[in-house]
Image (cartoon, helix red, strand yellow):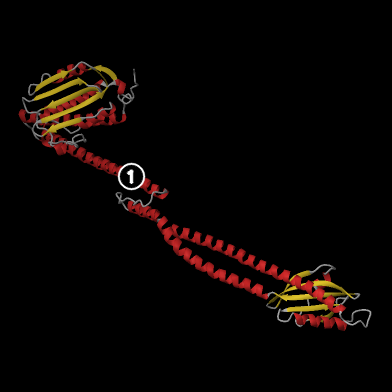
Amino acid sequence: MKFLYKILLCIIIITAVSFGLSGYFFVDYVFRTALDREVDQALDDSNILQFAMKTAALNIPTKYDILQDTAVQEIGMNLEKTGQGTGRLIRISDELRRPLYAGNGFAQNKDILENVKEDTVMWQILSQGDRYYIHTGTIVDTIDRKLYLETMEDVTRVYDERATGFGVYRQVTLVMLLCTAVVMFFICTLLTKPIRLLTRATRKMAAGDYGYRAKQVSNDELGQLTQNFNSMANVLENTIEELQDAVRAREDFIAAFSHELKTPLTAIIGYADLLRSRKLDDDKHFMCSNYIYTEGKRLETMSFRLLDIIVTKRGKADLLPVEAEEFARYLEEMFGENTNQEFRVSFEPGTVYADLNLIKSVLLNLLDNAFKASSPGGVVEVSGENTSTGYLFRVRDFGIGIPEEELNKVTEAFYMVDKSRSRSRNGAGLGLALCVQILNLHDSRLNIESKEGEGTCISFELPRREQTQRNGGGAENEK
């Protein structure tokens, strides 16, 4: 059953019980009040009849010492005549409780007659057929006789009014329940609208429409719940998009890795088969061996860089103070004898906190890319300078540059802007991906500025020790 109908059913039940109980107590109160009034009237009539009976007995001529039964019967008939039209019946009994006079239709019930006492008036409600009566009884002392006077007052009208009251109230209750059901249906529909909207939103999202959002129609708790649900949906959508991007990146990585393996392996297998199956002269033999060696070194470089990426993702960097001049000396030794391009080194004195070998690897990869992107005779610059927040390294070339639409992809593993040029220079597209992982351990990142045909400038900043919160992400602060 829908939540809307549950609420509606509960309200109808509560309303029905409330109307039913209140109606019962109201009608019953009216009935009790009317019945008490009739009882009081019956008791008053009994006292009046008792006085009238005594007066009538005194007015009868005295022939005997005691009041005769015939006189009593005559008094009874006269008393009953005075009550014609009121529905009152009279019964008079002697000392032995034997009826001397009884009105037509008087009940045979003798409970009051057997239990009545002097100076009291007893009463009870009798039902006779479909009629209701107030039965009273009292003792009358007159002319040396003790007689029993009983009356029956018809109060059926009071019971009929109660039945009518219950009937009318039932009809009123049904009408009120119908009106309440209609009104509360619209109210419950309005109140549960946010729940229906949330249900529709969850159904849409379960079907894969992660961009669907529930409409907020109120500012109460349900409105806040809708707002929280939409916030959760935003986070979920972003997370799913990140997961999908990660899956696509992994698939692209596997595809690129497979392709990068296939190219050198094809060359190695082909030239090895040529050496194995044919007898070649020295020049061709050297050429084939050189291809096998070159492609093998390419595979070796690619495997080492992949291993470095995996290690940096799982490991930690041991950050120690290193003088910037040490990087300058190392780079001059590595690239100072390069005869194809002009290599310029400029480092300001300063201290950085880093893993020496990992930062050397970053600089080597950046310079390797810079030399590959530069034409013979071109200029490659590497510099370092102190900043207010750390020490900034910068590698600049004036080569082919990177198209603007490629800038956000060059740090992906195996991604190469010019694949033919990279392969011809033993590249695999892993250098910048490795740099990103190493710099993540140093709380730094690559900043790439490039313009196609004018060159590229790649920089990164190592923060000061006072601002480093972890060394390799775990270095402790020192003041």
**View extreme (right): residue:** 65
In this rendered view, identify the residue nearer to me: 218 or 313: 218
Residue 376: image quadrant is top left
Point out the image quarter for the C terminus: top left
Apparent side of residue 127 relative to residue 207 in the rendered image (left or right)? right
Where in the figure is residue 280, as x and y percent of width and height? 7, 32
Up/down of 72 relative to 342, above or below: below
> x, y percentage for residue 132?
70, 75
The residue labelled by disc 1 is: 236
| Kind of residue at disc 1 | Leu
Q: Image quadrant for the N terminus? A: bottom left
Front residue of 144/62: it is: 62
Residue for point 55% across, 63% down: 19
In what element is the residue under mark 1? helix
**In the rendering, at what x and y percent does residue 75 appear?**
83, 81
- On the image, the x and y values in percent for residue 289 come to 11, 29
Q: Is residue 239 left or right of residue 401?
A: right
